[in-house]
Image (cartoon, grey):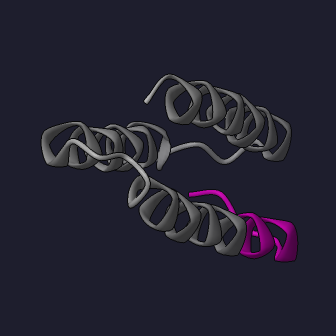
Amino acid sequence: MCMLTLKHFVLQKEVLNLYRQVTRASRSIPDPAARSETVAWFRGEIERNKHLTDVGVIESRINTTLRELRQVLRVS
């Protein structure tokens, strides 16, 4: 088992804040199905990556997800 550092907890909070942003931003999507699909997609990303412990990889995934989110919200 890997010992989690302060940086891990900071990143965890960042992911939670990002989830809140996604939820709020999804309100601008007019189609309810697309809105719930966007939130479900993001939640799936969190679940898929929850096992990661490498800080660099976690930061990279956060940045990638932010780019993807911006792209999804632009299209909608």
For residue 17, what is the image quadrant?
bottom right
Residue 25 placed where, x, y %?
51, 58
Residue 47 placed where, x, y %?
36, 47
- Is 9 drawn above or below residue 73 in the view shown? below
Residue furthest left as drawn: 33
The total number of labels drawn is 0
Residue at the (70%, 42%) spot, across then down: 62
Residue at the (52%, 71%) spot, across then down: 20
- Is 52 drawn above or below residue 61 in the view shown? below
Residue at the (41%, 44%) spot, across then down: 42
Towards the viewer: 31 or 6? 31
Residue 38 placed where, x, y %?
34, 40
Quadrant holding the N terminus:
bottom right
Magenta residue span: 1-11
Q: Is residue 9 left or right of residue 74?
A: right
Residue 59 placed where, x, y %?
80, 43
Q: Is residue 20 left or right of residue 36?
A: right
Q: Is residue 71 magenta?
A: no
Towards the viewer: 69 or 6? 69
Quadrant holding the C terminus:
top left
For residue 68, what is the image quadrant?
top right
- Is 44 drawn above or below residue 6 in the view shown? above
Residue furthest front as drawn: 30
Towards the viewer: 61 or 66? 66
Q: Is residue 26 left or right of residue 63?
A: left
Q: Is residue 2 magenta?
A: yes
